[in-house]
């Protein structure tokens, strides 16, 4: 385990089997559709590749980068599009793939944006859900794990751009983000 982790919350094996299960459930809904899987960079990258690898429907891949966070652990400001989609979503069935839903700010805004652009449907799939932190009225359609209000890192999730490559999800030691 990385030295900056308090403890491991979800092992690579737990993640692997749950992601596979959720992906297969979602896949069944899109067998006669041609969905656009939209990965939200950069947090969703590891989840995204493991998720789409399980799909058998004729899926297309695209990405967006948005920001609602600075380098801290508290949500702030307005949704900013840092990288937009290559695809036109008009008439498309979109599957948003996101690492974590916290306040709900990012996904509430993103879903509204894609519907405004004419998407036929928008399904939200999240790896983690911090239900207790919700401030915006939005819920994932599919979520892999409900977690408590702890700051987590790994499997795509960062603190100040670090730890994204860890194969498991760990709780970050408080002293790392509270200063020593
Ligand atoms: P929301 O807009 O408040 O729902 O925040 C969603 C974004 O906050 C996620 O895409 C993450 O980038 C970030 N975030 C929220 N909680 C955590 C965490 O525990 N670890 C790492 N990033 C987090
Ligand atoms: Mg993110």
Image (cartoon, rainbow, N blue to C red):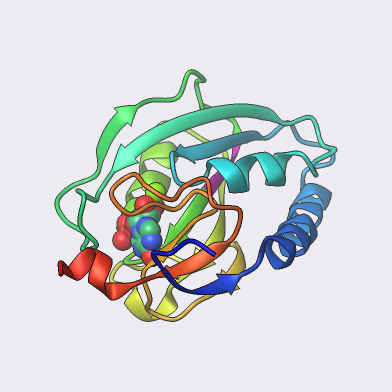
Q: Position of residue 61 (x, y in %)?
A: 62, 28
- Residue at horizontal 43%, vertical 77%? 131
Q: Quadrant of residue 115?
A: top left
Q: Position of residue 180 (x, y in %)?
A: 15, 69
In the picture, measured across the screen, residue 74 lies left or right of residue 109, that is left
In the picture, measured across the screen, residue 41 lies left or right of residue 56, that is left
User: Would you say residue 79 sits in the magenta stretch?
Assistant: no
Q: Nearer the viewer, residue 34 or 154?
A: 154
Q: Main secondary structure of the magenta part?
A: strand
- Residue at horizontal 45%, vertical 24%? 85
Q: Position of residue 118 (x, y in %)?
A: 46, 32
- Residue at horizontal 73%, vertical 31%? 59
Q: Position of residue 91 (x, y in %)?
A: 57, 29
In the picture, measured across the screen, residue 147 lies left or right of residue 46, that is left
- Residue at horizontal 59%, vertical 44%? 46
Q: Is residue 60 visible?
A: yes
Magenta highlight range? 93-97
Identify the image quadrant of the N terminus: bottom right
Residue ranking furthest to the top: 86
Q: Is residue 116 above or below residue 105?
A: above
Ligand 1 is in which quadrant of the figure? bottom left
User: Would you say residue 96 sits in the magenta stretch?
Assistant: yes
Q: Nearer the viewer, residue 132 or 173?
A: 173
Q: Is residue 98 above or below residue 36?
A: below
Q: Quadrant of residue 113?
A: top left
Q: Is residue 64 above or below residue 55?
A: above
């Amino acid at each position: 385990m990385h030295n900056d982790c308090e403890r491991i919350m979800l092992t690579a094996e737990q993640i692997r089997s749950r992601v596979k299960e959720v992906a297969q459930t979602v896949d069944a809904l899109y067998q006669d559709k041609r969905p656009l899987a939209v990965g939200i960079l950069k947090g969703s990258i590891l989840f995204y590749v493991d998720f789409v690898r399980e799909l058998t429907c004729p899926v297309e891949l695209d990405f967006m980068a948005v920001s609602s966070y600075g380098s801290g652990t508290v949500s702030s400001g307005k949704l900013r599009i840092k990288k937009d989609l290559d695809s036109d979503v008009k008439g498309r069935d979109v599957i948003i793939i996101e690492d974590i839903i916290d306040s709900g700010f990012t996904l509430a805004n993103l879903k509204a944006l894609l519907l405004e652009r004419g998407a036929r449907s928008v399904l939200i799939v999240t790896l983690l859900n911090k239900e207790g932190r919700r401030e915006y009225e939005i819920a994932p359609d599919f979520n892999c794990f409900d977690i408590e209000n702890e700051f987590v890192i790994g499997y795509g999730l960062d603190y100040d751009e670090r730890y994204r490559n860890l194969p498991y999800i760990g709780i970050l030691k408080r002293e790392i983000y509270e200063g020593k």
